[in-house]
């Protein structure tokens, strides 16, 4: 028997609102099952269980704010299952989250729960009508809800930054359409809290700059071969089977990372532990709401087409809700690709407890020396910010150079996954 | 075959599905989907897939890259019906 604790869902997240139970007492659960949905500043997250067992009791009613590390359910588990062994390099997400015993059995008595009703939503609603802004700002979930309930966003006073309407504003404004009436599914769990998300990003990034001695490297990558290869590949494919350049780049990174363990892991309590798996944290822009870096799990084991499918799925869930707790906490390195927005190069801030972040700028036509002549080539700046406590610039340089070399041979990146994992 | 108004309606539905933070009434025909509405390459990928699924038109990537606005998409789809 063990208590299942509210997991930490990333650096500096200290509480979450439990919004849905997906199990009830008596249900059998298996490793990887989603048992609950929680709402955080980063949107709705599906909480997974990492043990086999039977749910004995749910401690926490829906719509309760629960601190990270507090028990939320009791599981009857088999003693033979030791969940910690599945995740040898489990990161500790935040310094204050020492209770991040996450999914480990906690035999101690259940501490008093700090339960607070979700009253803040009501507090946010201003009774005085305000002039609707020129372009209504509203979160994706708020728009979905408004469309479903037939509410006009113009009638709602937003509580987000610059008056952005959050889903919570709508729920309170339209009690005749309670959340329970929504169709079950991932789409109904998208709420972001931009102000809280900004605070979480601020805390994680400030901690990073305070604690991690970053060093920075950059290299220019000739993308002619990769660009031609991708054009040829996509020309034969229907739209839903095409690849983005990002997928090719992420694949190259995942492949190279296996040979650079000092870039892929966690620095915690003074020691570095490389990760056996390669989980690429992908910086995904949430438009008005902020930034989130969920992990593309086991990216080194995916072939190119599967990686693209998973990336598409991850992006969709990041923006509409439905990320899993493991994806929030188990990134082993982060990649930011700001080239999309026309930036030539981006120098990232490491997401603790990771030790490296790669940045990829836009692919643009540049003068490029070939022998004694100049030619115009599509060129991309690749950058690395890495933790000097763990690696030195020399290794970092080799790492970037290997990514560069790997991108010169795209066909090799398109090998089936099983051959990949044998190499 | 859809007329221009039907195409507009269908495309706006798919665009707002790809980018749920946009509302149908704020999408104008001439605005750049990428620059004005912040659609990124993943959004474009999803939109091309959605057009293929809904309208049966497989827009080649080289053509799709040139279609920047709702008006351009409508004109292209009028010329290239399924």
Image (cartoon, coloured by chain):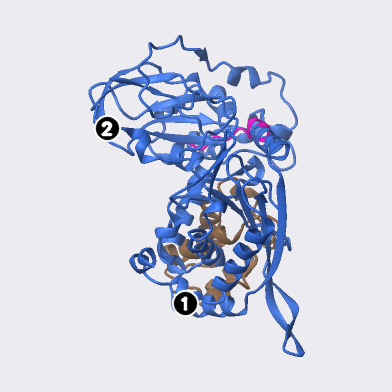
Q: Nearer the viewer, residue A338 or A341?
A: A338
Residue A212 located left or right of residue A37: right
Nearer the observer, A318 or A220 = A220
Q: Residue at x 68, y 35 (%)?
A: A207
Give the labeled residue for mark 1: A411
A190 drawn magenta: yes
Q: Quadrant of residue A33?
A: top left
What is the quadrant of the N terminus of chain A in the image?
A: top left
In the rendered structure, the answer to whether residue A255 lies left or right of residue A139 reads: left
Q: Which chain is brown?
A: B
Question: What is the distance, in whole Å, between disc 1 and disc 2 at their CAs?
Answer: 42 Å
Chain letter, blue in picture: A
Q: Position of A167 compared to A109: left or right?
A: right
Q: Secondary structure at mark 2?
A: loop
Instruction: Specify the subunit that label 2 lies on.
Output: A
Along the line of sight, the residue nearer the viewer: A174 or A162: A162
Q: State the quadrant of the C terminus of chain A.
A: bottom left
Horizontal and vertical percent for residue A337? Answer: 63, 57
Chain letter of mark 1 equals: A
Whether residue B6 appears in this view of the structure is no
Image coords of residue A43 (percent x, y): 53, 36
Q: Is residue A333 above or below residue A16?
A: below
Q: Is residue A360 magenta?
A: no
Report the magenta residues as a range: A189-199
The residue to which callout 2 is attached is A81
Residues A134 and A310: in front is A310
Circle 1 sits in a helix, a strand or a loop, which is it? helix
Check chain identity for marks 1 and 2: say if they share one: yes
Tell me the residue at 74%/27% (across/down).
Answer: A130
């Amino acid at each position: 028997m063990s208590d299942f604790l509210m997991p930490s869902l990333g650096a500096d997240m200290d509480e979450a609102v439990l919004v849905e139970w997906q199990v009830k007492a008596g249900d059998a659960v298996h490793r990887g099952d989603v048992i609950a949905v929680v709402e955080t500043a980063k949107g709705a997250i599906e909480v997974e269980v990492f043990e086999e067992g039977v749910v004995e009791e749910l401690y926490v009613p829906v719509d309760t704010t629960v601190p990270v590390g507090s028990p939320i359910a009791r599981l009857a588990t088999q003693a033979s299952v030791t969940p910690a062994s599945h995740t040898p390099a489990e990161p500790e997400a935040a310094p204050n989250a020492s209770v991040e015993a996450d999914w480990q059995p906690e035999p101690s008595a259940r501490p008093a729960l700090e339960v607070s009703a979700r009253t803040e939503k009501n507090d946010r609603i201003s009774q005085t009508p305000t002039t609707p802004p020129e372009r209504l700002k509203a979160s994706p979930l708020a728009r979905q809800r408004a469309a479903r309930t037939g509410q006009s966003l113009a009638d709602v006073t937003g509580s987000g930054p610059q008056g952005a309407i959050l889903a919570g504003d709508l729920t309170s404004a339209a009690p005749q359409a309670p959340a329970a009436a929504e169709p079950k599914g991932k789409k109904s769990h998208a709420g972001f809290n931009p102000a809280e998300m900004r605070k979480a990003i601020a805390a994680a990034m400030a901690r990073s700059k305070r604690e991690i001695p970053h060093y920075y490297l950059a290299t220019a990558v000739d993308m002619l071969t990769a660009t031609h290869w991708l054009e040829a590949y996509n020309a034969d494919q229907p739209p839903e089977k095409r690849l983005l350049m990002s997928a090719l780049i992420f694949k190259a990174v995942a492949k190279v990372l296996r040979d650079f363990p000092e870039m892929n892991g966690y620095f915690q309590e003074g020691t570095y532990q490389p990760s056996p798996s390669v989980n690429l944290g992908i910086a995904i822009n949430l438009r008005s709401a902020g930034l989130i870096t969920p992990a593309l799990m086991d990216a080194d084991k995916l072939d190119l087409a599967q990686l693209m499918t998973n990336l598409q799925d991850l992006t969709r869930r990041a923006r509409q809700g439905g990320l899993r707790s493991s994806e929030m906490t188990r990134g082993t390195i982060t990649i930011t690709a700001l080239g999309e927005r026309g930036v030539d190069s981006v120098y990232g801030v490491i997401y603790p407890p990771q030790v490296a972040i790669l940045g990829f700028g836009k692919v643009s036509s540049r003068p490029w020396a070939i022998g004694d002549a100049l030619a115009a080539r599509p060129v991309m700046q690749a950058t690395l910010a890495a933790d000097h406590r763990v690696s030195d610039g020399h290794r970092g340089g080799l790492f970037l150079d290997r990514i560069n070399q790997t991108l010169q041979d795209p066909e090799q990146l398109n090998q089936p996954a099983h051959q990949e994992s044998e190499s | 075959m859809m007329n221009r108004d039907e195409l507009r309606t269908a495309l706006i539905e798919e665009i707002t599905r790809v980018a749920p933070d946009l509302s149908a009434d704020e999408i104008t025909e001439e605005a750049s989907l990428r620059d004005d509405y912040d659609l990124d390459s993943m959004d474009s990928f999803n939109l091309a897939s959605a057009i293929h699924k809904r309208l049966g038109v497989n827009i080649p990537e080289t053509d799709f890259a040139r279609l920047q606005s709702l008006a351009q998409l409508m004109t292209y789809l009028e010329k290239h019906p399924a």
